[in-house]
Amino acid sequence: MVQSDESTGSGAVEMAALEAEATQAIAAASSADELEEARVRYLGRRSELKQALRQVRDRETGMVLNSLRDRLEAAHEARRAELERAGRATAGEDGFDPTLPGEAPPRGSLHLLTQLRRRIEDVFLGLGYEVYDGREVETVWHNFDALNQPEAHPSRDPRDTFYVDEDTLLRTHTSPSQIRAMLDRQPPLYLVSLGRVYRRDALDATHTPVFHQVEALAVDRDITLADLRGTVEHFTSAVFGGRREIRMRTSFFPFTEPSVEFDMTCYLCDGAGCAVCKHSGWIEMGGAGVVDPNVFESVGYDPEEWSGFAFGLGIDRIAFNRHGLPDLRLFWENDIRFLEQF
Ligand code: FA5
C-alpha cells in the first residue's frame, strides 16, 4: 500500500518504485490489450494508486499522488497514440485492421515491344498470313548464302556479326526465316516472322546490339511490286492508324530485285512536317523488294512459276518513333517508371 510517511520517507520510496514499475509496464505494452492491462493495474479503480488516493488525509500527500497519477495518465496516452500510429492500437494483436481502406496492388502490363509485336501479328493474321517462328541461332547458309549474300559482303565480317563458330551465328536479321519457311512448305505461302536479331552495332540512342524485326513474305503466282505496296500500306495504316501513304526509294538488298526502302507519311502531322518526322513529312520504315530468283533457286522453287515479295523492318525503331522516345536503350533498362507508361 502506498502511504504518505514523510517522517521515514518510506512512502516516497514506494511511490518512486511504483512509478518506475508502471511507467515501464506502459512503455512495454506492444498492443492495445497489453496497454489496457497496464492501465487497469496501475490506474484502474482497484489499483494501489487509486486506493492510496482514496485514503489521503493531507493536502501534501494528495498533491504528490495526483501528480503521479497525471504523469502515468500522460505516459498511457502517449503510448496509446504511439500504438495507434503504428496501426496496432485499433487493430488488436495480429496488427490487422479491417476498417482501414485496402491498398490496390499495382498492375503489371506487357512490355511495349510485346504489345507492338502482338498488334503487328494481329494485322497480318487479319490478312490471312501465318505467323512463322524462325531461329535466333542460325547457320551461315540460312542467314547469308541462301539469301544470295555475296561472300565478300561486309555484314559477314565478325566485327559486324556474332559468330558461334565458323558455320553458326546469331541471326543478323529475320530474313533467314524466309528460307526456313520456304524449305518447310510449298507455295503459295503468306507468312510473317517476328523476333530478336543481333548485330555488333555500337550501343547508342538509335542502335542496340539486340533488337527486333518483323519480316513478311508472300509467294504466289504473278506477285508484283504493286502487291507489296498495297500490303505495306495496309500494314502501316493498321498499326499507326489513319490512312498512311507509302513512298518507295530504290535501294539494294542481295535477296530482292528490285529492292526498295519505304517510308510512310508521318502519323502525327499527316505529311505536313513536324518534329517527329524532322519536318520531312515522312518516316523511314524498312526494306523490301521482289524476291530474287536466286533465293527461289536455293530453296528449290521454280522462279519461272513463282514470284514473291518480302519486307522487313525494325520493331524497336517503330515503337521509338510512335512514342517519341529519346533513346532505344530504355527498352532494355527495365525502369518501372518508363515501362508503366504503356
Ligand atoms: C534488313 O535487315 C533486311 N533484312 C530487311 C529486308 C527484309 C529487306 C526483306 C528486303 C526484304 P536493314 O539492315 O536495313 O535491313 O534493317 C532493317 C531495320 O532494322 C532498319 O530499318 C532499322 O529499323 C532496324 N535496325 C537496324 N539496325 C538496328 C539497330 N542496331 N538497333 C535497332 N534497330 C536497328
Image (cartoon, helix red, strand yellow):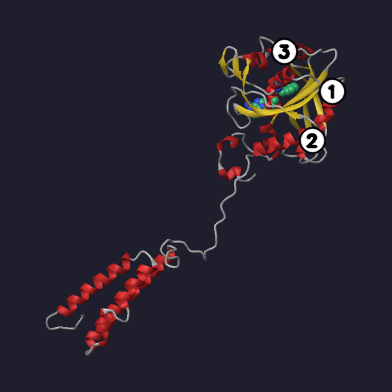
Q: Amino acid at mark 2?
A: Gly
Q: Which residue is mark 1?
A: 225
Q: Secondary structure at mark 3?
A: loop
Q: CA distance from mark 1 to mark 2?
A: 21 Å
Q: Is residue 71 visible?
A: no
**Number of numbered markers:** 3
Cβ atoms at labels 3 and 1 below 8 Å apart = no
Identify which amino acid the numbered label 1 is placed on. Answer: Leu
Q: Earlier in the sequence, mark 3 or mark 1?
A: 3
33 displayed left or right of 277: left
Q: Are dots 1 and 2 in contact, CB under 8 Å?
A: no
Front: mark 1 or 2: 2
- Identified by mark 3, the residue type is Asn
Q: What number is the disc on residue 148?
A: 3
Residue occupying image coordinates x 21% and y 80%: 2
Ligand 1 neighbours mark 2 (CB distance < 8 Å): no
Q: Is residue 98 in view from this perspective?
A: yes
Q: Position of residue 126 (x, y in %)?
A: 79, 35
In the image, residue 153 lies at what x, y percent? Answer: 67, 13
In the depicted structure, whether residue 95 falls above or below residue 322: below
Residue tagged 2: 126
Instruction: Note whether 219 is above or below 114 in the view shown.
Output: above
